[in-house]
Each structure stands twice: as structure tokens, then as C-alpha cells.
Amino acid sequence: MIRVLIADDQMMVRQGFTVLLNAEPDIEVVGQAVDGLDAVARTAELAPDVVLMDIRMPELDGIEATRRITGAAGSQVKVLVLTTFDLDEYVYEALRAGASGFLLKDASADELANAVRVVASGDALLAPNLTKRLIVEFSRLTEAPRAPLKGQVDALTERETEVLSLIAQGLSNAEIASGLVLAEQTVKTHVSRILVKLGLRDRTQAAVFAYECGLVRPAGY
């Protein structure tokens, strides 16, 4: 059972998502939070697997709440950011703060449930075109490739570097395996080693890292 906490300052959003998710046989909403501070406290209290996090909330915004939740010692909680617009300027900052992906608030019940499952499993929510476009679009706003980050890439093998660049392009393990003519389990092993070597939480963070260190650049830039 996937345990979910919903953090949003709008009661109708919290209640609506609760009804939709509790209708799924493998998902349970264990709590609700009315603002960022409440989200941090409730996460520590309830230890959910996934937090659905609104960005704009009083007391503490979703970006800082995400940073505190994912940065807590030993935290395995995944954060899925909720937004009204797919190119919200704050969403990229939330990804940098540790969020594993984002979801539009007008998503269907099936899209909502699937997003929760994807993030809970540790996979990146990169397959949907919106997420991929957002990372590419907002990578233009970051500073020039940072030397410390680029230095970390040197710890990767040539094959791991290649896999990392493909992750950043939104490819799944199966697609990477097909393109590189490898077994899918081999790709999974490479991904696991990449995350460990770079100290990253999941594939979404790996994609952000690849853009920020300059390993991958948006098309045309």
C-alpha cells in the first residue's frame, strides 16, 4: 500500500484528491496538510511514501517544504509537486529542491494515481512530455555549468555517463537498453550506480544534474 500525504492550502483540492486516491486499491491517503510548515510536520509524524505538494502555500512555500522533507536525515519520502501551469517558473526550483516530478492539478484520476505509483517506485516522472519539456525549458535559466558538478561526472564510467545523458533525455530503462543494445537489468544496474556515485535520490534528480553540469544541453542552446 502506497501511503500519501496531500499538502495544499485549498480544502477542495485536498478533499478531491483524497477521494480519488482512496478509490485506488493500492493507495491510501494517510493525512492532509494545510501549508508548508504543516506538511513538514505531518511528514515527520506520518512517514508517507509520497507527498503531493502544492507550490504556493502560506507560512512556508512548497519549494522550501520540499527541501526540508527530502533533506531530512534518512528521508526516503518522494515529493510530487502540484501546479496549475505546466511551465510554472517555480516548478524547476522544486525539482532542484528534491522533488521527484510534477503533476498538473487538472490531471485525470488515472494520471494522478499513475504519477503516485511512478514516483513511489523510485522511477522518474519524466516520460510525460510536459515534465521533459519543463526540465529542458528551465535548464536555460541556470547558471553556466558548475565546475564542482562537472567534476563529479569524472567519477562515472564512460557507459554510466552515456546512460546518464539518456536519462536526462527522458528515456526509460527499456528504451536505453534498446538503444545501447544492453539487457534492461544491466541498465538498471548502471542507473543504481549513477545515483549512488552522484548522491542523487532518483532519476529526476539525475536528469536535473545532467543539465546543470552541462553534460546535456537543451536543443538549440
Image (tube, rainbow, N blue to C red):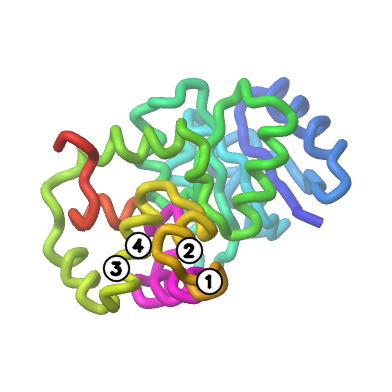
Q: Which one is nearer the viewer's eye here, 185 or 27?
A: 185
Q: Where is residue 78 in the image (x, y as percent from the top left)?
A: 57, 54
Name the image quarter holding the C terminus.
top left
Helix, strand or loop status at disc 2 = helix
Q: Residue 161 carries which label?
A: 3
User: Who comes first in sequence, dot 1 or dot 2?
Assistant: 2
Confirm whether residue 179 shows in the render: yes
Looking at the rendered image, the disc whose residue lies closer to the viewer, 2 or 3, is: 2
**Label 3 neighbour load within 10 Å: few <14, some 14-19, many 20+:** some
Q: 93 left or right of 123?
A: left
Q: Where is residue 219 in the image (x, y as percent from the top left)?
A: 22, 37
User: Who comes first in sequence, dot 4 or dot 1?
Assistant: 4
Q: Name the residue under label 1.
A: 183
Looking at the rendered image, the disc whose residue lies closer to the viewer, 4 or 1, is: 1
Is the Cβ of the residue at disc 3 closer than 8 Å to that at disc 4?
A: yes
Q: Name the residue under label 2.
A: 177
Q: Which one is nearer the viewer's eye here, 195 or 172?
A: 172
User: Who comes first in sequence, dot 2 or dot 3?
Assistant: 3
Is the Cβ of the residue at disc 1 closer than 8 Å to that at disc 2?
A: yes
Write the residue at 53% across / 71% down: 183
- The three-letter amino acid code for the residue at tag 4 is Leu
